[in-house]
């Protein structure tokens, strides 16, 4: 029996150590490739500049919501496009609702709900060419002080600079201290 134990112990040690991984790379993330995300800030006053604007081309579309003959397409960080989809082969871009810090939306009936940094906005979209802001619910959404990506380096958000409304990928000379 002793002989069996002495022969199995080295195998167990080998098995256990083969599963060991250094924790350093996992605490600091994978190798830094020279790029990372930098927060884009707005002041509380700038966040309140919400308006219906003429239609514009989609550049960085996010979520899409369909309601009846209309498409509501989020433009990551900047607002919502409203398109008439009566003829799906040729949708018509009707208007753009400029909403700084917008990443999410929902629509029910004639009401559009959208985030505006930490605030929740409610719009009447009965006339998609002239959307009307009906209500602003202050601080309804928790701060999101990290980019909407995984396994990336980013500059840590600094509340003294304003409210984070977006992120831009940039070249960085040194590895930022934040990783997600």
Image (cartoon, grey):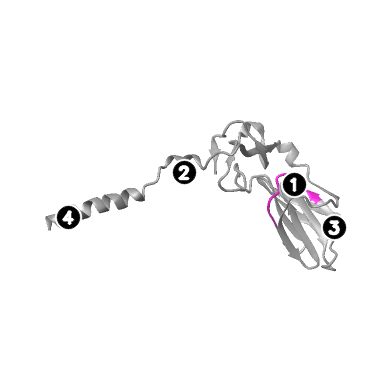
Query: How many residues crowd mark 2 within 10 Å: few (<14), some (14–19), many (20+)?
Result: few
Please provide the residue range marked out in magenta. 97-105
Numbered label attached to residue 26: 2
- Front position among marks 2 and 3: 2
- Front position among marks 1 and 2: 2
Of labels 1 and 2, earlier in sequence is 2
In the structure shown, which secondary structural element does the residue marked by tag 4 occupy?
A: helix
Q: Which residue is mark 4?
A: 5
Q: CA distance from mark 2 to mark 4?
A: 35 Å
- Front position among marks 1 and 4: 4
Of labels 1 and 4, earlier in sequence is 4
Q: Residue furthest left?
A: 1
Q: Position of residue 161 (x, y in %)?
A: 66, 32
Q: Which residue is mark 3?
A: 93
Numbered label attached to residue 78: 1
Query: From what the image shows, is residue 45 above or below residue 52?
Result: above
Q: Are marks 4 and 3 in contact (CB under 8 Å)?
A: no
Front residue (pair 16, 152): 16
Query: How many residues crowd mark 4 within 10 Å: few (<14), some (14–19), many (20+)?
Result: few
Of labels 2 and 4, earlier in sequence is 4
């Amino acid at each position: 029996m002793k002989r069996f134990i002495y022969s199995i112990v080295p195998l167990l040690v080998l098995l256990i150590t083969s599963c060991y991984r250094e924790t350093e790379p996992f605490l600091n993330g994978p190798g830094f490739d020279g790029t990372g995300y930098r927060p884009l800030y707005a002041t509380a006053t700038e966040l309140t500049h919400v308006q219906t604007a003429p239609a514009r081309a989609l550049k960085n579309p996010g979520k899409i919501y369909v309601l009846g003959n209309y498409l509501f397409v989020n433009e990551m960080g900047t607002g919502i496009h409203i398109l008439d989809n009566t003829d799906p082969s040729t949708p018509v871009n009707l208007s753009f609702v400029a909403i700084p810090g917008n990443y999410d939306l929902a629509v029910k009936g004639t009401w559009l709900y959208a985030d505006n940094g930490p605030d929740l906005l409610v719009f009447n979209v009965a006339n998609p060419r002239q959307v009307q802001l009906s209500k602003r619910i202050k601080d309804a959404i928790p701060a999101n002080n990290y980019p909407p990506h995984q396994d990336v380096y980013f500059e840590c958000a600094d509340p003294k600079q304003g409210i984070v409304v977006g992120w831009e990928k940039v070249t960085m000379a040194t590895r930022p201290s934040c990783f997600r």
